[in-house]
Image (tube, rainbow, N blue to C red):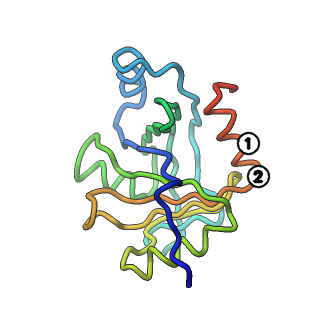
Amino acid sequence: MNVPVLAPHFCQVAWVVKDIAKAETFFTQIMGVKKFVHADSLAKDNEGMYMGQPGDWVIRISLAYAGDTQIELIQHMSGKSIFEDYLERHGDAVQHVAYWLDESEYDAAAQHLEASGYPLIQGFKGRIGRVGYFDTRAAIGVVTEIVGSNQEGHEIRRNLKAGSF
């Protein structure tokens, strides 16, 4: 098996927060981030999982760019999720980093992480493609997300980065 090289696909730092509006205010007024796009009451779809079981989470997210790096803010609303777990243990904090791949690369990257001892702890298949969160906390202190994007996901990301939303 060819070992996937994930580093060039690094794209995001994500925080879990209790108050998403407060976090947005910090990034816009203090750090100079231009604008966030929101997804309120984002629910996992029918193919979501949490710790090997069907997922039932609902979250709010806000996305923006700081240079070439995407900032994601996540506020847990209901259900069981890795976001709620992390927030309860650590409070408002960086919860994961993300790598954006094409959907054709997802399986190899996921198998590589799991074979390296980093299990899938939450995931879903949705509008933008497949998303998996792998437990890399023992190695780097945070979870690692990989996104296997379809064409619609790539277009959404390009528009977000260009400020066309």
Judge whether 142 appears above or below 72 on screen: below
Residue pictured at 69% horizontal, 26% vertical = 164
Residue pictured at 25% horizontal, 43% vertical = 91
Q: Give the position of the C terminus as an image quadrant.
A: top right
Horizontal side of 37 relative to 31 (left or right) equals right
Task: Report, in whole angstroms, how far the alpha carbon at label 2 lies from the one at label 1.
Answer: 6 Å
Q: Residues within 10 Å of mark 1 (few under 14, many from 20)?
A: few
Q: Quadrant of residue 75?
A: top left
Residue pictured at 44% horizontal, 78% vertical = 114
Q: Which mark is residue 102?
A: none
Task: Say which of 95 and 102 sits in front.
Answer: 102
Numbered disc total: 2
Horizontal and vertical percent position of residue 133: 46, 62
**Secondary structure state at the residue bearing disc 1:** helix
Horizontal side of 153 relative to 91 (left or right) equals right
| Residue beneath disc 2 | 151
Name the amino acid, label 1.
Glu
| Residue beneath disc 1 | 155
Horizontal and vertical percent position of residue 161: 61, 33
Judge whether 120 appears above or below 98 on screen: below
Name the amino acid, label 2.
Gln
Q: Residues within 10 Å of mark 2 (few under 14, many from 20)?
A: few
**Secondary structure state at the residue bearing disc 2:** helix
Horizontal and vertical percent position of residue 84: 36, 52
Horizontal side of 136 relative to 79 (left or right) equals left
Of all residues, the one furthest to the bottom in this rendering is 1
Horizontal and vertical percent position of residue 129: 68, 58
Judge whether 77 appears above or below 1 on screen: above
Residue pictured at 34% horizontal, 17% vertical = 30
Dots 2, 1 in contact, CB < 8 A: yes
Q: Quadrant of residue 85?
A: bottom left
